[in-house]
Image (cartoon, rainbow, N blue to C red):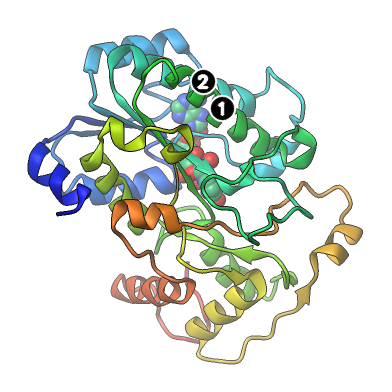
Amino acid sequence: MTLLQESREGLKWSPIIFTTGGEGLVGSRFHKLISQEYAQVTSTDIDKIDITDGEAVNHWIEKYRPDVLINFSAMTDVRAIEKERGNLDGGAWRVNALGAENLAEACLTNKAFLIHISTDFVFPGYPAVPEAGLFAEDAEVAQSPDEVSWYGWTKREGERLVQEKMRRGGEYVIVRITRPIRAEFERDDFARNILKLYSEGRLYPMMNDMSASPTYIDELTEALKRLIQIRQPLFFSQPDQRILHVVSCDQMTIFDYSDSLIRKFTGKEPMIEGVMMKDFYEQHPNMYKLPKAGLLSDYTQKLLGMRFMSCREQIEELYRQREALGLIVSRDPVFVS
Ligand SMILES: NC(=O)c1ccc[n+]([C@@H]2O[C@H](COP(=O)([O-])OP(=O)(O)OC[C@H]3O[C@@H](n4cnc5c(N)ncnc54)[C@H](OP(=O)(O)O)[C@@H]3O)[C@@H](O)[C@H]2O)c1
Protein backbone atom coordinates (compact mmCIF):
# COMPACT_ATOMS: atom_id res chain seq x y z
CA MET A 1 0.00 0.00 0.00
CA THR A 2 1.42 3.39 -0.94
CA LEU A 3 1.58 6.29 1.49
CA LEU A 4 -1.18 7.99 -0.45
CA GLN A 5 -3.45 4.93 -0.19
CA GLU A 6 -2.63 4.60 3.51
CA SER A 7 -3.45 8.23 4.19
CA ARG A 8 -6.69 7.90 2.23
CA GLU A 9 -7.65 4.80 4.19
CA GLY A 10 -6.54 6.23 7.50
CA LEU A 11 -7.79 9.79 7.38
CA LYS A 12 -11.03 9.85 5.45
CA TRP A 13 -11.41 13.41 6.52
CA SER A 14 -13.60 16.04 5.03
CA PRO A 15 -11.58 19.17 5.57
CA ILE A 16 -12.78 22.75 5.64
CA ILE A 17 -10.92 24.29 2.71
CA PHE A 18 -10.47 28.02 2.22
CA THR A 19 -8.89 29.68 -0.77
CA THR A 20 -7.62 33.21 -1.24
CA GLY A 21 -7.52 34.68 -4.74
CA GLY A 22 -10.31 32.23 -5.56
CA GLU A 23 -11.71 34.28 -8.42
CA GLY A 24 -8.52 34.45 -10.48
CA LEU A 25 -7.47 32.37 -13.47
CA VAL A 26 -6.20 29.43 -11.41
CA GLY A 27 -8.26 29.66 -8.22
CA SER A 28 -11.63 29.89 -9.94
CA ARG A 29 -11.08 26.71 -11.95
CA PHE A 30 -9.82 24.88 -8.87
CA HIS A 31 -12.88 26.00 -7.02
CA LYS A 32 -15.28 24.92 -9.73
CA LEU A 33 -13.80 21.43 -9.90
CA ILE A 34 -13.25 20.79 -6.22
CA SER A 35 -16.59 22.06 -4.96
CA GLN A 36 -18.20 19.09 -6.73
CA GLU A 37 -16.38 16.79 -4.29
CA TYR A 38 -15.83 18.72 -1.10
CA ALA A 39 -18.82 20.32 0.57
CA GLN A 40 -16.85 22.70 2.75
CA VAL A 41 -14.91 24.81 0.28
CA THR A 42 -15.01 28.56 0.54
CA SER A 43 -13.51 30.83 -2.06
CA THR A 44 -12.50 34.31 -1.02
CA ASP A 45 -11.10 37.24 -2.90
CA ILE A 46 -9.81 40.66 -2.02
CA ASP A 47 -13.31 42.02 -1.42
CA LYS A 48 -13.74 39.51 1.45
CA ILE A 49 -10.20 39.32 2.74
CA ASP A 50 -7.22 41.48 1.83
CA ILE A 51 -4.17 39.35 2.53
CA THR A 52 -1.97 42.42 3.03
CA ASP A 53 -3.90 43.14 6.26
CA GLY A 54 -2.23 40.78 8.75
CA GLU A 55 -4.66 41.45 11.58
CA ALA A 56 -7.71 40.88 9.41
CA VAL A 57 -6.20 37.66 8.02
CA ASN A 58 -5.54 36.30 11.49
CA HIS A 59 -8.98 37.28 12.73
CA TRP A 60 -10.61 35.64 9.73
CA ILE A 61 -8.70 32.34 10.09
CA GLU A 62 -9.33 32.29 13.83
CA LYS A 63 -13.04 32.76 13.21
CA TYR A 64 -13.55 30.19 10.45
CA ARG A 65 -10.83 27.67 11.43
CA PRO A 66 -10.11 26.15 8.02
CA ASP A 67 -8.15 22.88 7.99
CA VAL A 68 -6.55 23.83 4.69
CA LEU A 69 -5.85 27.23 3.22
CA ILE A 70 -4.74 27.50 -0.41
CA ASN A 71 -3.21 30.81 -1.38
CA PHE A 72 -3.92 31.59 -5.03
CA SER A 73 -3.89 35.33 -4.48
CA ALA A 74 -1.14 37.33 -6.08
CA MET A 75 -0.36 40.28 -8.26
CA THR A 76 0.62 38.66 -11.56
CA ASP A 77 0.97 41.34 -14.24
CA VAL A 78 4.72 40.88 -14.72
CA ARG A 79 5.16 43.84 -17.06
CA ALA A 80 3.27 46.28 -14.81
CA ILE A 81 5.00 44.97 -11.69
CA GLU A 82 8.41 45.65 -13.24
CA LYS A 83 7.67 49.35 -12.80
CA GLU A 84 7.60 48.75 -9.01
CA ARG A 85 11.14 47.35 -8.96
CA GLY A 86 12.73 47.94 -5.55
CA ASN A 87 9.56 49.41 -4.08
CA LEU A 88 8.77 47.72 -0.78
CA ASP A 89 5.57 49.78 -0.47
CA GLY A 90 4.43 48.61 -3.91
CA GLY A 91 1.41 46.34 -4.40
CA ALA A 92 3.41 43.36 -5.66
CA TRP A 93 5.71 43.30 -2.65
CA ARG A 94 2.81 43.75 -0.26
CA VAL A 95 0.65 41.01 -1.81
CA ASN A 96 3.19 38.46 -3.07
CA ALA A 97 5.72 38.68 -0.22
CA LEU A 98 4.07 40.19 2.88
CA GLY A 99 0.62 38.77 2.09
CA ALA A 100 2.10 35.27 1.92
CA GLU A 101 3.85 35.88 5.23
CA ASN A 102 0.58 37.04 6.84
CA LEU A 103 -1.15 33.85 5.74
CA ALA A 104 1.72 31.72 7.05
CA GLU A 105 1.61 33.44 10.44
CA ALA A 106 -2.15 32.94 10.73
CA CYS A 107 -1.97 29.30 9.59
CA LEU A 108 0.83 28.60 12.05
CA THR A 109 -1.12 30.14 14.94
CA ASN A 110 -4.37 28.42 14.02
CA LYS A 111 -2.87 25.07 12.93
CA ALA A 112 -4.12 25.21 9.36
CA PHE A 113 -2.30 23.47 6.50
CA LEU A 114 -1.07 26.16 4.09
CA ILE A 115 -0.65 25.40 0.40
CA HIS A 116 1.10 28.38 -1.14
CA ILE A 117 1.06 28.67 -4.93
CA SER A 118 4.24 29.98 -6.53
CA THR A 119 5.95 30.21 -9.91
CA ASP A 120 8.97 29.27 -12.04
CA PHE A 121 9.84 33.00 -12.10
CA VAL A 122 11.58 32.50 -8.72
CA PHE A 123 14.46 30.88 -10.66
CA PRO A 124 17.22 33.00 -12.19
CA GLY A 125 16.19 34.38 -15.56
CA TYR A 126 18.02 34.40 -18.90
CA PRO A 127 20.77 33.39 -19.48
CA ALA A 128 20.90 31.08 -16.44
CA VAL A 129 20.18 27.38 -16.90
CA PRO A 130 20.94 24.83 -14.15
CA GLU A 131 23.43 22.03 -14.76
CA ALA A 132 20.63 19.52 -15.21
CA GLY A 133 19.17 21.71 -17.96
CA LEU A 134 15.93 22.19 -16.06
CA PHE A 135 14.96 23.51 -12.65
CA ALA A 136 14.13 20.68 -10.24
CA GLU A 137 12.13 21.18 -7.04
CA ASP A 138 15.32 21.58 -4.98
CA ALA A 139 17.22 23.78 -7.49
CA GLU A 140 18.55 27.06 -6.13
CA VAL A 141 16.22 30.02 -6.57
CA ALA A 142 17.45 33.52 -7.53
CA GLN A 143 19.80 35.02 -4.99
CA SER A 144 19.37 38.64 -5.97
CA PRO A 145 16.59 40.75 -7.52
CA ASP A 146 18.94 41.49 -10.46
CA GLU A 147 18.62 37.86 -11.57
CA VAL A 148 14.85 37.93 -12.01
CA SER A 149 11.82 40.06 -12.83
CA TRP A 150 10.50 42.09 -9.88
CA TYR A 151 7.42 39.83 -9.92
CA GLY A 152 9.76 36.82 -9.63
CA TRP A 153 11.62 38.42 -6.74
CA THR A 154 8.43 39.23 -4.81
CA LYS A 155 7.26 35.63 -5.27
CA ARG A 156 10.68 34.29 -4.28
CA GLU A 157 10.54 36.41 -1.14
CA GLY A 158 7.01 35.15 -0.51
CA GLU A 159 8.35 31.58 -0.56
CA ARG A 160 11.21 32.51 1.78
CA LEU A 161 8.92 34.27 4.25
CA VAL A 162 6.49 31.33 4.30
CA GLN A 163 9.39 28.94 4.95
CA GLU A 164 10.82 31.13 7.69
CA LYS A 165 7.52 31.50 9.53
CA MET A 166 6.67 27.83 9.25
CA ARG A 167 10.05 26.78 10.64
CA ARG A 168 8.41 27.11 14.05
CA GLY A 169 6.38 23.96 13.34
CA GLY A 170 3.68 24.88 10.85
CA GLU A 171 2.35 22.63 8.13
CA TYR A 172 2.82 23.93 4.63
CA VAL A 173 3.71 23.08 1.06
CA ILE A 174 4.83 25.39 -1.74
CA VAL A 175 3.46 24.39 -5.15
CA ARG A 176 5.12 25.99 -8.16
CA ILE A 177 3.26 26.17 -11.43
CA THR A 178 4.09 27.70 -14.82
CA ARG A 179 1.94 29.14 -17.62
CA PRO A 180 -1.35 27.78 -16.20
CA ILE A 181 -3.92 26.88 -18.86
CA ARG A 182 -7.61 26.00 -18.96
CA ALA A 183 -10.29 25.66 -21.65
CA GLU A 184 -12.05 28.97 -21.01
CA PHE A 185 -11.91 32.02 -18.79
CA GLU A 186 -12.55 35.73 -19.19
CA ARG A 187 -8.80 36.36 -19.39
CA ASP A 188 -6.50 34.67 -21.92
CA ASP A 189 -3.83 32.31 -20.69
CA PHE A 190 -0.59 31.15 -22.32
CA ALA A 191 -2.20 28.81 -24.87
CA ARG A 192 -5.37 30.79 -25.62
CA ASN A 193 -3.27 33.95 -26.02
CA ILE A 194 -1.10 32.27 -28.67
CA LEU A 195 -4.20 31.08 -30.54
CA LYS A 196 -5.87 34.46 -30.31
CA LEU A 197 -2.84 36.41 -31.53
CA TYR A 198 -2.31 33.93 -34.35
CA SER A 199 -5.93 34.14 -35.48
CA GLU A 200 -5.61 37.95 -35.50
CA GLY A 201 -2.34 37.81 -37.46
CA ARG A 202 -0.49 39.43 -34.55
CA LEU A 203 1.62 36.56 -33.23
CA TYR A 204 5.13 37.78 -32.47
CA PRO A 205 8.23 35.58 -33.03
CA MET A 206 8.33 32.64 -30.66
CA MET A 207 11.47 31.70 -28.71
CA ASN A 208 13.45 28.85 -30.23
CA ASP A 209 15.59 28.18 -27.20
CA MET A 210 13.29 28.81 -24.24
CA SER A 211 11.53 25.75 -22.87
CA ALA A 212 8.03 25.67 -21.48
CA SER A 213 6.38 23.19 -19.15
CA PRO A 214 2.82 24.50 -18.73
CA THR A 215 0.43 23.57 -15.93
CA TYR A 216 -2.98 22.23 -16.86
CA ILE A 217 -5.13 23.69 -14.08
CA ASP A 218 -7.40 20.63 -13.94
CA GLU A 219 -4.33 18.49 -13.26
CA LEU A 220 -3.15 20.97 -10.62
CA THR A 221 -6.54 20.55 -8.94
CA GLU A 222 -6.07 16.78 -8.80
CA ALA A 223 -2.56 17.26 -7.36
CA LEU A 224 -3.89 19.64 -4.70
CA LYS A 225 -6.63 17.18 -3.78
CA ARG A 226 -4.01 14.48 -3.26
CA LEU A 227 -1.86 16.82 -1.21
CA ILE A 228 -4.80 17.63 1.03
CA GLN A 229 -5.37 13.94 1.59
CA ILE A 230 -1.70 13.18 2.30
CA ARG A 231 -1.16 16.01 4.79
CA GLN A 232 1.29 14.08 6.91
CA PRO A 233 3.82 16.34 8.60
CA LEU A 234 6.54 13.68 8.85
CA PHE A 235 6.27 13.01 5.18
CA PHE A 236 7.60 16.47 4.41
CA SER A 237 10.36 16.53 7.00
CA GLN A 238 12.88 18.70 5.09
CA PRO A 239 12.15 22.19 3.79
CA ASP A 240 13.02 21.29 0.20
CA GLN A 241 10.66 18.27 0.34
CA ARG A 242 7.88 20.78 0.83
CA ILE A 243 8.42 22.30 -2.60
CA LEU A 244 6.50 20.72 -5.46
CA HIS A 245 6.32 21.40 -9.19
CA VAL A 246 3.01 20.72 -10.90
CA VAL A 247 3.79 21.13 -14.60
CA SER A 248 3.79 19.02 -17.78
CA CYS A 249 5.94 15.88 -17.50
CA ASP A 250 8.06 17.08 -20.45
CA GLN A 251 9.13 20.36 -22.03
CA MET A 252 8.87 21.91 -25.44
CA THR A 253 10.43 25.07 -26.76
CA ILE A 254 7.98 27.94 -26.96
CA PHE A 255 8.31 27.75 -30.76
CA ASP A 256 7.52 24.03 -30.93
CA TYR A 257 4.68 24.37 -28.44
CA SER A 258 3.10 27.17 -30.50
CA ASP A 259 3.58 25.17 -33.68
CA SER A 260 1.85 22.07 -32.21
CA LEU A 261 -0.94 24.12 -30.65
CA ILE A 262 -1.77 26.08 -33.81
CA ARG A 263 -1.46 22.97 -35.96
CA LYS A 264 -3.98 21.16 -33.75
CA PHE A 265 -6.46 24.03 -33.70
CA THR A 266 -6.22 24.93 -37.40
CA GLY A 267 -5.40 21.57 -38.94
CA LYS A 268 -2.90 23.46 -41.08
CA GLU A 269 0.82 24.13 -41.30
CA PRO A 270 1.42 27.14 -38.98
CA MET A 271 3.13 30.25 -40.31
CA ILE A 272 5.15 31.45 -37.34
CA GLU A 273 8.53 33.06 -36.89
CA GLY A 274 11.19 31.99 -34.40
CA VAL A 275 13.72 34.01 -32.42
CA MET A 276 16.69 33.10 -30.21
CA MET A 277 16.67 34.57 -26.70
CA LYS A 278 20.03 36.27 -27.31
CA ASP A 279 18.62 38.14 -30.32
CA PHE A 280 15.40 38.89 -28.48
CA TYR A 281 17.25 40.51 -25.57
CA GLU A 282 19.47 42.46 -27.96
CA GLN A 283 16.33 43.88 -29.55
CA HIS A 284 14.57 44.41 -26.18
CA PRO A 285 17.32 45.29 -23.68
CA ASN A 286 14.81 46.56 -21.09
CA MET A 287 12.70 43.42 -21.07
CA TYR A 288 12.45 41.75 -17.65
CA LYS A 289 14.25 38.46 -17.19
CA LEU A 290 12.38 35.35 -18.26
CA PRO A 291 13.51 31.90 -17.14
CA LYS A 292 15.10 30.07 -20.07
CA ALA A 293 14.54 26.54 -18.75
CA GLY A 294 11.34 24.79 -17.73
CA LEU A 295 10.64 22.90 -14.51
CA LEU A 296 11.25 19.27 -13.63
CA SER A 297 8.51 17.49 -11.71
CA ASP A 298 9.90 13.99 -11.15
CA TYR A 299 9.92 14.27 -7.33
CA THR A 300 6.38 15.66 -7.27
CA GLN A 301 4.94 13.01 -9.59
CA LYS A 302 6.49 10.26 -7.47
CA LEU A 303 5.28 11.80 -4.23
CA LEU A 304 1.71 12.19 -5.45
CA GLY A 305 1.59 8.94 -7.41
CA MET A 306 0.63 10.84 -10.56
CA ARG A 307 1.93 11.04 -14.09
CA PHE A 308 1.40 14.55 -15.36
CA MET A 309 0.29 15.12 -18.95
CA SER A 310 2.92 15.87 -21.58
CA CYS A 311 2.72 19.18 -23.48
CA ARG A 312 1.12 17.43 -26.45
CA GLU A 313 -1.39 15.65 -24.23
CA GLN A 314 -2.31 19.02 -22.71
CA ILE A 315 -2.93 20.42 -26.20
CA GLU A 316 -5.16 17.44 -27.04
CA GLU A 317 -7.06 17.90 -23.76
CA LEU A 318 -7.47 21.63 -24.36
CA TYR A 319 -8.89 20.93 -27.80
CA ARG A 320 -11.19 18.22 -26.45
CA GLN A 321 -12.54 20.44 -23.67
CA ARG A 322 -13.07 23.44 -25.95
CA GLU A 323 -14.84 21.24 -28.46
CA ALA A 324 -17.09 19.84 -25.71
CA LEU A 325 -17.91 23.41 -24.65
CA GLY A 326 -18.86 24.29 -28.23
CA LEU A 327 -15.99 26.76 -28.41
CA ILE A 328 -14.52 25.39 -31.63
CA VAL A 329 -16.97 26.53 -34.25
CA SER A 330 -14.79 25.56 -37.18
CA ARG A 331 -11.10 25.00 -37.59
CA ASP A 332 -10.80 28.09 -39.79
CA PRO A 333 -10.90 30.74 -38.44
CA VAL A 334 -8.90 29.07 -35.74
CA PHE A 335 -10.22 30.55 -32.56
CA VAL A 336 -13.38 31.97 -31.15
CA SER A 337 -12.70 33.30 -27.65
N1 LIG B 1 -0.95 33.39 -14.40
C1 LIG B 1 0.26 32.87 -14.59
O1 LIG B 1 0.80 32.87 -15.72
C2 LIG B 1 0.99 32.23 -13.44
C3 LIG B 1 2.19 31.52 -13.70
C4 LIG B 1 2.86 30.90 -12.65
C5 LIG B 1 2.37 31.00 -11.36
N2 LIG B 1 1.23 31.72 -11.12
C6 LIG B 1 0.77 31.83 -9.73
O2 LIG B 1 -0.50 31.22 -9.63
C7 LIG B 1 -1.27 31.87 -8.60
C8 LIG B 1 -2.61 32.26 -9.17
O3 LIG B 1 -2.39 33.16 -10.26
P1 LIG B 1 -3.56 33.59 -11.26
O4 LIG B 1 -3.00 33.54 -12.62
O5 LIG B 1 -4.81 32.86 -10.94
O6 LIG B 1 -3.68 35.13 -10.86
P2 LIG B 1 -4.91 36.11 -11.08
O7 LIG B 1 -5.83 35.61 -12.12
O8 LIG B 1 -4.31 37.45 -11.23
O9 LIG B 1 -5.67 36.01 -9.69
C9 LIG B 1 -5.09 36.47 -8.51
C10 LIG B 1 -6.20 36.72 -7.52
O10 LIG B 1 -5.62 37.29 -6.33
C11 LIG B 1 -6.47 38.31 -5.89
N3 LIG B 1 -5.76 39.30 -5.08
C12 LIG B 1 -4.92 40.27 -5.49
N4 LIG B 1 -4.51 41.00 -4.43
C13 LIG B 1 -5.10 40.46 -3.35
C14 LIG B 1 -5.09 40.78 -1.96
N5 LIG B 1 -4.39 41.82 -1.47
N6 LIG B 1 -5.82 40.02 -1.11
C15 LIG B 1 -6.57 38.99 -1.59
N7 LIG B 1 -6.62 38.64 -2.88
C16 LIG B 1 -5.90 39.38 -3.76
C17 LIG B 1 -6.99 38.94 -7.19
O11 LIG B 1 -8.15 39.68 -6.92
P3 LIG B 1 -8.50 40.93 -7.87
O12 LIG B 1 -8.59 40.38 -9.26
O13 LIG B 1 -9.81 41.39 -7.34
O14 LIG B 1 -7.38 41.90 -7.71
C18 LIG B 1 -7.23 37.70 -8.03
O15 LIG B 1 -8.51 37.17 -7.81
C19 LIG B 1 -0.40 33.04 -8.13
O16 LIG B 1 0.31 32.64 -7.00
C20 LIG B 1 0.57 33.26 -9.27
O17 LIG B 1 1.77 33.85 -8.82
C21 LIG B 1 0.51 32.31 -12.13
- Which mark is on residue 164? 2
What residue appears at the point 71 percent right and 56 percent down from the top-left corner?
129
The residue lying toward the viewer, choosing from 143 and 310, is: 143
Neighbour tally class for label 2: few under 14, some 14-19, many 20 plus, Cα within 10 Å: some
Side (left or right) of 114 relative to 100? left
Any part of residue 178 in sight: yes
- Which mark is on residue 24? none
| Residue 225 x/y as whole percent | 25, 46
Quadrant in which residue 326 is drawn: bottom left
Neighbour tally class for label 1: few under 14, some 14-19, many 20 plus, Cα within 10 Å: some
Please determine whether, in this image, residue 124 is positioned above or below residue 316: above
The residue lying toward the viewer, choosing from 99 and 50, is: 99
What residue appears at the point 73 percent right and 41 percent down from the top-left corner?
148
Q: Quadrant of the N terminus?
A: bottom left
| SS of the residue under disc 1 | helix
Side (left or right) of 331 relative to 122? left
| Residue 267 x/y as whole percent | 50, 90
- Residue carrying label 1: 160
| Residue 260 x/y as whole percent | 55, 81
Amino acid type for the residue under numbered disc 2: Glu
| SS of the residue under disc 2 | helix
Please determine whether, in this image, residue 300 is positioned above or below residue 171: below
Amino acid type for the residue under numbered disc 1: Arg
- The answer to whether the residue labelled 2 contacts the one labelled 1, judged by CB atoms less than 8 Å apart, is yes
The residue lying toward the viewer, choosing from 250 and 216, is: 250
What residue appears at the point 57 percent right and 25 percent down from the top-left corner?
97
Please determine whether, in this image, residue 161 is positioned above or below residue 15: above
